[in-house]
Amino acid sequence: MTDLLHRLRASFGRPFDLLGLGECSLDFLYRVPLALSQPLPDKASALGQEVLGGGQIATACAAAARLGLRARFVGAVGDDDAGAALRSELAREPVDTSRMKTCSRCQTRTALILLGQSGERSVIEWRDPALTLPIETLSAQDVAEARMLHVDLSFPSASLWAAEQARAHGLIVSVDLDRPAPHCAELLRLTDLCVVSEHFPARFTHKTDPEQAALALSHATPGQVIVTQGDRGCWLVDGPHIRRFPAFAPPQLLDTTACGDTFHAALLAALLTSADQPAPVSLDHALPSAIRFASAAAALKCADLGRRGCPSRAQVDRFLHDAPPELTV
Amino acid sequence: MTDLLHRLRASFGRPFDLLGLGECSLDFLYRVPLALSQPLPDKASALGQEVLGGGQIATACAAAARLGLRARFVGAVGDDDAGAALRSELAREPVDTSRMKTCSRCQTRTALILLGQSGERSVIEWRDPALTLPIETLSAQDVAEARMLHVDLSFPSASLWAAEQARAHGLIVSVDLDRPAPHCAELLRLTDLCVVSEHFPARFTHKTDPEQAALALSHATPGQVIVTQGDRGCWLVDGPHIRRFPAFAPPQLLDTTACGDTFHAALLAALLTSADQPAPVSLDHALPSAIRFASAAAALKCADLGRRGCPSRAQVDRFLHDAPPELTV
C-alpha cells in the first residue's frame, strides 16, 4: 500500500479535508456534589448543568474544524429538539451537516453525564433502536469529495461501505473503535490509521499483556496503530517495536471528555499539513511530530467542558512553541 | 373568613379559572437496567429516554387544563432550547403562557430523573441561580382575572405578593409546599387550601407524631389542611379531628411522578364545579367529594409517564362511575 502521506498529497484540492461518519449525541452534563462511588440519593441538587454536543465522530469533526480543516459530518438524528440543537451546534463550528439524516418518529441519541465531586464520571447513554443510517445517505461522489475518512462502528454497514469507497477514491481511512463489534476485523483491513484507547487491543485480540495486544492488533490492519493512554501518553506500534510518547500536562484540567476525539482530529490535521508541504516529508518523520501535535491538542482540550474545549490551531502552535522540544521517552 | 365556596361562586365569569405561579422544569427521564441502591457504573445504556415538562406548579396547571379548566401559568425559563420546549409543551395543553418570563443569559430549570429497574427513582435537579421571577412580571389586574391561585415558594416574593393580591380580589389561594422555606408561615396565613405531602407537617411543626404535626399545621393557617400519603390515601384535618380517605388502586401503575400535582389540580377543579352548581353546596359536603375526585385523578395519572398521564375529566368521571361509592375509612 502506498505511503499514506503520498495518498494525502495526491488528494490536494478536494472540497473537504475530513469526512466523518458515525456517532453524534446531545450530552446532558450535570455536576453534582456527590461521590459517585456511593448510591445516588432520592433527590439532589446539581451544582451546574450543561448541554453539549457529543458523540465521538461528530466531536472529532468539530475538533478538526477548530484546527482549520474543512469537515463534513454524516450521521443520524431524530426529528426532535435534541436533533435540531445538535445539528445547529455542529453547523456553527463550522462543520458541513448537509448529508446528515433526520429519522422520522425517532429520538436523537443522548447521553447523560454525571460528574461527581472528585471528577469521577458516570455516563448513561440512550440510543433509539429506530435510529439508522442507510448506505444511501451518502453517494460515492460524496466520499470522493474528501481527503480523509474518519469512522466508528455505530452504523457498521454504512461505515464499511464508506471505507471501501474511500480506498477506491484515494482517501486515508481513520477509525475510532472502543470495543469489538460486528465488522471490526473487516474495517481494520481497510484502515490507514487506527488510534484506539488502551482497553481496545486486549478486548480485540484476547491478549492480556498490553504490549502483546498492541502488536497483535497491528497484525490485523495494514495501517498505523496508536494506543492512547490518557495522561500516561501513547504508544506507536512500529514494526515489532513499541515507541512510547508521553502526554503533555494540561495547563488547566476541568474535563477530559472529548480528549480522545481531539487527539484523532489533531493527528489527522497534522498529517495533512505534512502531506501538503512543498518538499515531501517521510511518514517516519511526520508521524512522531503529528503525535506531538495531537498530544498537545488533547492536553489543551481539558481546559473546558466537552467539545467546547477543543483548541484552535493557533493555540496548539503557541503551546508547542513554549513546550520542551523532546517528547519521546 | 367567608366560606371558600362562596368566594369561588362570586368570581364566576372571570377569564381564567386557575392562575399558577411557581416552578416549571424540563425533565429528562432515563429508564435504566440498574438497581439505584447500588453505585452507578462508569457507563451504562438506558432502556429508554423521555423529555417531559415538569415542575409542580406548571404540572398542576397542565393537569387542570386536562380537566377542562382555563389555566394560566406564570414562571421563569431561560433563553435556551429547554425554555422554548417547555413553553410550547405547556401551550399545547392548552395553558396560557403569555405571562411567563424568559430570563436572558440564563438556563431553564431541568431535572434529571433516573428510573431504576424496580421503579425506584433518583432525581437530580438543576436550577440556575440567575433564574428570577420579579413581582413586576404580573399585574394586580392579571391576578384579578382568575378565580383561584396556586403557588409554591420557588419565587417567595412573587408568590407572597400574588397571594396578597388574590385575597384582595376574591381568589381562593392554594399552596404546594414540600419543605419549610422563607416566608412559609406568612404564605400559610393567606392560604385557603393547604395540600401537602406527608413529610411536610413534621418538618414545619417539628412534631414527630404525624397526627399531632397535621393538627399543628392546621393552626398555622386559616385554610383547609390535607395531608397526602401516596397509595395510603390522605388525611383531612377537620377541627381537632383527622378524617382519613383511602387512595384508589391505580388501574395501571407505570409512574407516580406528578400524582401530587394532579391531586392539587383535581381538588381545585372539583371545588370549582361544586361552587358553580345552581343550588349552593356546603363545603362540608363538597370537600370529601372533591377529595374523592382528586384521589381518582391521581390514581389514573399513574398509567403514563410524568404529566403525560394526567387524565381528562371524562376519564375521571367514568372511573368514579365504576368505582365503589364509599371512600371514607
Image (cartoon, coloured by chain):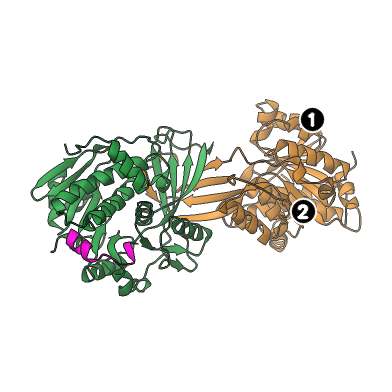
Chain colours: A orange, B green
| Residue at the spot 16% in from the left edge and 52% down from the top edge | B205
Q: Residue furthest left?
A: B240
**A150 left or right, relative to A23:** right
Q: Can residue B146 be found in the magenta stretch?
A: no
State the quadrant of the C terminus of chain B.
Answer: top left
Q: Which residues are magenta?
A: B5-18
Subunit of label 2: A
* Residue A183 percent coordinates (x, y): 73, 31
Reading the image, the residue beneath label 1 is: A219
Q: Quadrant of residue B70?
A: bottom left
Q: Depth check: B195 or B80 in front?
A: B195
Relative to A125, does residue A61 appear above or below in the rendering? below
Relative to A255, does residue B146 appear above or below in the rendering? below
| Residue at the spot 29% in from the left edge and 66% down from the top edge | B13
Within 10 Å of disc 1 (Cα), the crowding (few <14, some 14-19, many 20+) is: some
* Residue A12 percent coordinates (x, y): 88, 55
Res. A63 visible in picture:
yes
Reading the image, the residue beneath label 2 is: A269
Which amino acid is tagged 1?
His
Subunit of label 1: A
* Residue A276 percent coordinates (x, y): 86, 56
Relative to A239, does residue B138 appear above or below in the rendering? below
State the quadrant of the N terminus of chain B.
Answer: bottom left
Question: Looking at the picture, do discs 2 and 1 lie on one chain?
Answer: yes
Which amino acid is tagged 2?
Ala
